[in-house]
Image (cartoon, grey):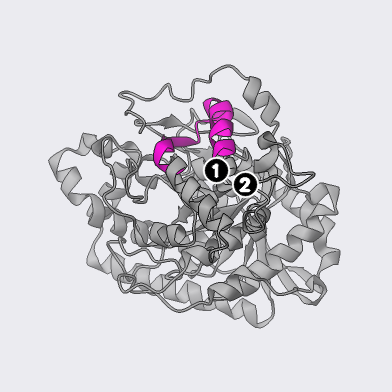
Amino acid sequence: MPRELGMPAHEELLSLSAVEMRRRVGTKEISPVELLEASIARIEALNPAVNAVCATDYARARREAKVAETAALKGEALGALHGLPAAIKDLHDAEGLLTTHGSPLYRGNVAARDCAMVANVRRAGAVVFAKTNVPEFGAGANTRNPVWGATGNPFDPHLNASGSSGGSAAALACDMIPVCTGSDTGGSLRTPAAYCGVVGMRPSPGVVPMEFRPLGWTPISVLGPMGRSVADARQLFAAQIGMNDGEPLAFPMSPERIAVGRPCDLGGLRVAWTEDFGQCPVSREIRAVMRGRIGAMRHLFRACDEVVFDFGEADRCFDVIRAMNFVTRYAAAYAKDPSSLGPNVRANYEMGARMTMAEVAWAHAEQTRVFRRFQAHFRNYDLVLAPTAAVTPFPWTQLYLAELEGKPLRNYYHWLAPTYFITLVTNPAISIPCGVDHMGLPFGIQAVGRFRGDAELLDAAEAMETAFAAIPELRRPRPDTRKLAAAPTSALKSIVTHPPILS
């Protein structure tokens, strides 16, 4: 495919947005083959420093990229992601690729077929060629496991990239891959995005099919998009969504409405904000950063009010509902050999196994009460803003945060309360970069939209992102990839006990 005058050099292709890449593929300015080779070269240069990408299949991808190039040259109808290199979170089946879930139990598991979401992404024309790292079975917000090792933060590989979509977030931040998928139960799309300086959106449950979810009627787990910008995330999201008869919570949403945003006048929006939703553990430093960010952005909105929220017994409620999922999924493995499961998974299973029917009934009723009280706030406001993460990134060698401000936390995921509180109410939420925190590391702000208001939330987030770019204090930070490329091979894989063979 011929280059246009002024075309970026091969090594710079991946600095383009995914939206711009797709446009240039369609106009024959760049080739899917070039994009794939640029991704492979970038992975080889930077992945040793952060360990974000795990299984790969370059041979198949090269064949598919060539087919995509031929289709573009012939002027065929092209999908929304045509020719873009894509990576799938290692919890989700992508046919022909290792899908290990970060567990030794699945060390050699090559997926026989795509899950529905991955099939949608392929139909949109993406070249799926890699998997991104996760905590074991996605449990916890530190992306490390005994199969692939740990993923480091692109801003400092000694620190946590969060999780469970930490591999996707780090790969995006390093411009290794333009399209990366994720999922979210307690904040697994949002917290990694905040820690790595990218965008992560938790959609409304059911919009992206999750036909493999054992408790299909329980809405706490969703699949969703990540991107280096809101526009990139919505481009992927539009490809992921679709009705599916294996998804009990499915409801129709227009991909066209998601893909093409509508102008949003921030000056007409009424915004509520909070440091902690009334009870989440949040560090003093992050509270101060949040107040400073609100001070720097409040002039953008019609109103920007600090609001008191009542989340009742949200922590206990989330404990019960989360544990139900673990009991359903891991009962057989636990009965066979508890030691085959990592400490986070065992802790959740054992918590659930001790619970009674009365506790389960209470949790569902409490979730309903919390939901109704939260929705009442949207009678007066259009958005709710909060810090995405409670603390600055901490070392990946620390499995989880055990205490905050000198007080012990309830369990290994309690420090994720600012995101899992929103999981309980099921509203769509997005984390967008908002400058750096007191340690000079990325700070993410979580914007929560109205119930099932995914499109409107994306419109507002895109307008906020544009406004933030003009305010130095709020602008998206970028990692020093030259420093990463020059860094010696890290110890991120040091916790691997029996490394699998890469495809």
Residue 146 part of the magenta segment? no
- Which residue is denoted by mark 2 in the rendering? 1
Is label 1 in contact with label 2 (beta carbons under 8 Å)? yes
Name the residue nearer the viewer: 488 or 307: 488
Q: Is residue 165 above or below residue 204?
A: above
Percent position of residue 219, x then y: 40, 67
Q: Examine the residues drawn in magenta and state their main secondary structure.
A: helix
Looking at the image, residue 443 sits to the left or right of residue 152; the answer is: right
Residue type at mark 1: give it: Val
Residue at (46, 76) in percent of width and height: 369
Residue neighbourhood size for the residue with mark 1, other residues' Cα within 10 Å, grouped as few (<14), some (14–19), many (≥20) = many
Residue 315 visible in the displayed image: no
Residue 283 visible in the displayed image: yes
Residue neighbourhood size for the residue with mark 2, other residues' Cα within 10 Å, grouped as few (<14), some (14–19), many (≥20) = some
Name the residue nearer the viewer: 330 or 498: 498
Looking at the image, residue 399 sits to the left or right of residue 467; the answer is: left
Q: Is residue 440 above or below residue 496?
A: below
Say which mark, if any, is on residue 33: 1
